[in-house]
Image (cartoon, rainbow, N blue to C red):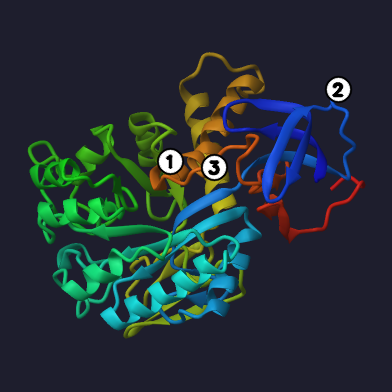
Amino acid sequence: MKTYLVQHLFDGESLHNNMHLSVENGLIGSITSAVNSTLKPSAVLKGLVCAGFIDTQVNGGGGVLFNHDQSQAALRKMVQGHAQYGTTAMLPTLITDSSQTMQKAAHAIAHAVAESMPGIVGIHYEGPNLSLEKKGIHSSEQIRPLSDTDLATFTRKDTGKVLVTLAPESVPTDVIRDLVSHGVVVSLGHSGASLDTTIAAIDAGARGFTHLFNAMSGLTARNPGMISAALSDPRVSCGLIVDLQHVHAQNCALAYQCIGPQRLMLVTDAMAHVGSDLQTLPWLNSTITKVGDKLSLNDGNLAGSCLDMSGSVRNMYKLLVQRRLAISPKKDQQNTLPTGVQNDILGNVLNMASCAPANFLNLTGFGHLKAGYRADFVLLDENIYTKACWIKGQQIAGNKVSLKIV
């Protein structure tokens, strides 16, 4: 057993100070006040410890793109590329590709799951059953109806948690029911579906929306579209890319107000650039280029993101604080919110990066810091930058900790 003395700890419900966190056999053993504890800590963690971040949409990282490389080495690079920013569990995401590439991706994930590779909890197939009208950077040549081959890949039982993004106008509701009956989590996206078609898919078991606001039918006076269902239906969760390139800050705040932190999930939609010095990446007949915090194709269209999860948390926290300041009478002469209000906002945002995706994927033992839960946790500094990261109790990123304050 190893015990840490933690300066600040958010367990998913409350913020605590001066705590002892014990870890044994990859699980959290106990969380107790240091004042009353008889445990002897072996390391001191200065900063805020919270549950590890869970990212349901990771196209790449560490210099590799999952579509380009489905090897075990590539998966390890993706995990390491994102762990330095607090991600402790992810779904490597395959953008629309051939059936053969999908099968190779499934084999790679099955191997990683069988070997308990740290950080890999399943796979996300984003496509190929999407709308050509809303395809984004997906290959129009590979977008296709659901085949028996692809269905068999989706419903494998050895690939951990399986998330499939599909356009409901392209997949019959009875097929959605069948996917759900096999344990597949169905999310709606890259779609121009009407409200009625969208609701029918939710009735059939779809439980999510992929990158809310992007590549989906919009909200207008007489055509509510997918966005209306995403904002109003309490049965669904929504992924949101908060790089402030994909979605305006006002719409991020709107999603938070309508959906709430229990069902609104922070995602990165990260490409290979995260956790690497990569600047350009070949994609189909174009090139994805990083300029500042933005990834674009040669034609200027967005092409995934270079966002990491701690950056997503920072962005969402800052925009929500700014919005609260703009409308709140409870601010002091320095134009700041009370500490309790700021802590409440931060706790909600941290849950959007951990508890909400854990619930969405039905990941038991993830998303909170509690006795018996996975010892997946992150140490953040006062500016919400990641200092260190642990998966199953093993530190995999950041400076090694000791009795010295880190």
Question: What mark, if any, has residue 14 been given in the picture?
Answer: none
Give the residue at mark 3. 365
* Residue lying at 65% horizontally and 33% vertically, measured from the top left: 10
Q: Position of residue 142 (x, y in %)?
A: 22, 78
- Asked if residue 264 lies left or right of residue 72, the reply is left
- Asked if residue 119 lies left or right of residue 300, the reply is right
| Residue 371 vertical position relative to residue 86 in the rendered view, above or below | above
Whichever of labels 1 and 2 marks the residue nearer the N terminus, that label is 2
* Residue lying at 46% horizontally and 79% vertically, measured from the top left: 70
Query: How crowded is the residue under tag 1: few (<14 C-alpha within 10 Å), some, or many (20+)?
Result: some
Q: Report the front residue among 173 and 114.
A: 114
Give the residue at mark 2. 35
Disc 3/disc 2 C-alpha distance (Å): 27 Å
Q: Amino acid at mark 1?
A: Asn
Q: Tag 2's secondary structure?
A: loop
Query: How crowded is the residue under tag 3: few (<14 C-alpha within 10 Å), some, or many (20+)?
Result: some
Disc 3/disc 1 C-alpha distance (Å): 10 Å
| Residue 218 vertical position relative to residue 323 in the rendered view, above or below | below
Give the residue at mark 1. 359
- Asked if residue 267 lies left or right of residue 132, the reply is right
